[in-house]
Image (tube, rainbow, N blue to C red):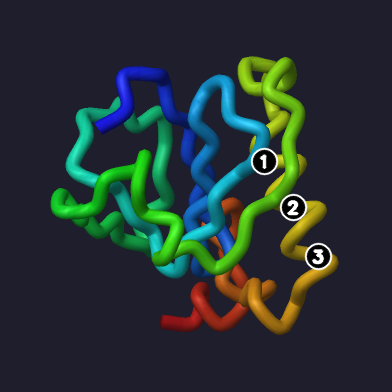
């Protein structure tokens, strides 16, 4: 397991994971963790996190959908990860489910 801090952004049916110092953001299907402790700041009630403790974030490239290039100097800038994820998702609607949003509820979710 990495000893460097990891940030995750969950949206569009994907997990965007950025480890401090990395030059890329890993994109994985589902809302996943890899068995490491984390602090949850906020989470809507309409999605579930899945723990995959057998996956090692330092060696799990085979499970990535893609990697988004990133500037390591931006890692701790507020909103940098979310902005990169939003930009990528908007440009890749075949991979990112633009209707599966964790940051707001769609009309379909409100009718349930």
Q: Residue at coordinates 15% horizontally, 49% vertically from top-left? A: 53
Mark 3: give few (<14), some (14-19) or many (20+) Cα within 10 Å. some
Residue 44 versus residue 42 in the image, above or below: below
- Name the residue tied to disc 1: 82
Question: Residue 60: where, in percent of width, then height?
Answer: 36, 54
- Name the residue tied to disc 3: 90
Marks 2 and 1 in Cβ contact (< 8 Å): yes
Question: Residue 85: where, in percent of width, then height?
Answer: 69, 50
Residue 62 sits in quarter:
bottom left
Marks 3 and 2 in Cβ contact (< 8 Å): yes
Total numbered badges shown on the rendered structure: 3
The residues bearing labels 3 and 2 have C-alpha atoms spaced at a distance of 6 Å
Left or right for 84, reference 75: right
Label number found at residue 86: 2
Q: Secondary structure at mark 3?
A: helix
* Quadrant occupied by the C terminus: bottom left
The residues bearing labels 2 and 1 have C-alpha atoms spaced at a distance of 6 Å
Q: Secondary structure at mark 2?
A: helix
Q: Earlier in the sequence, mark 1 or mark 3?
A: 1
Residue 48 versus residue 94 in the image, above or below: above
Q: Residue at coordinates 37% horizontally, 62% vertically from top-left? A: 47
> 55 or 112: nearer the eye?
55
Mark 1: give few (<14), some (14-19) or many (20+) Cα within 10 Å. some
> 110 or 62: nearer the eye?
62
Label number found at residue 35: none
Mark 2: give few (<14), some (14-19) or many (20+) Cα within 10 Å. some
Residue 60 versus residue 30 in the image, above or below: above
Q: Residue at coordinates 39% horizontally, 59% vertically from top-left? A: 31
Residue 73 sits in quarter:
top right
* Quadrant occupied by the N terminus: top left
């Amino acid at each position: 397991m990495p000893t460097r801090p990891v940030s995750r952004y969950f949206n569009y049916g994907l997990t965007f994971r950025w480890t401090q110092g990395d030059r890329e953001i890993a994109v994985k299907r589902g809302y996943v963790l890899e068995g490491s402790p984390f602090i949850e700041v906020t989470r809507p009630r309409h999605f579930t996190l899945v723990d995959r403790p057998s996956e090692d974030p330092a060696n799990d490239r085979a499970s990535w959908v893609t990697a988004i290039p990133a500037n390591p100097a931006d890692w701790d800038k507020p909103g940098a990860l979310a902005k990169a994820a939003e930009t990528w998702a908007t440009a890749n609607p075949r991979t990112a489910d633009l209707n599966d949003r964790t940051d707001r509820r769609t009309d379909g979710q409100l009718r349930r």
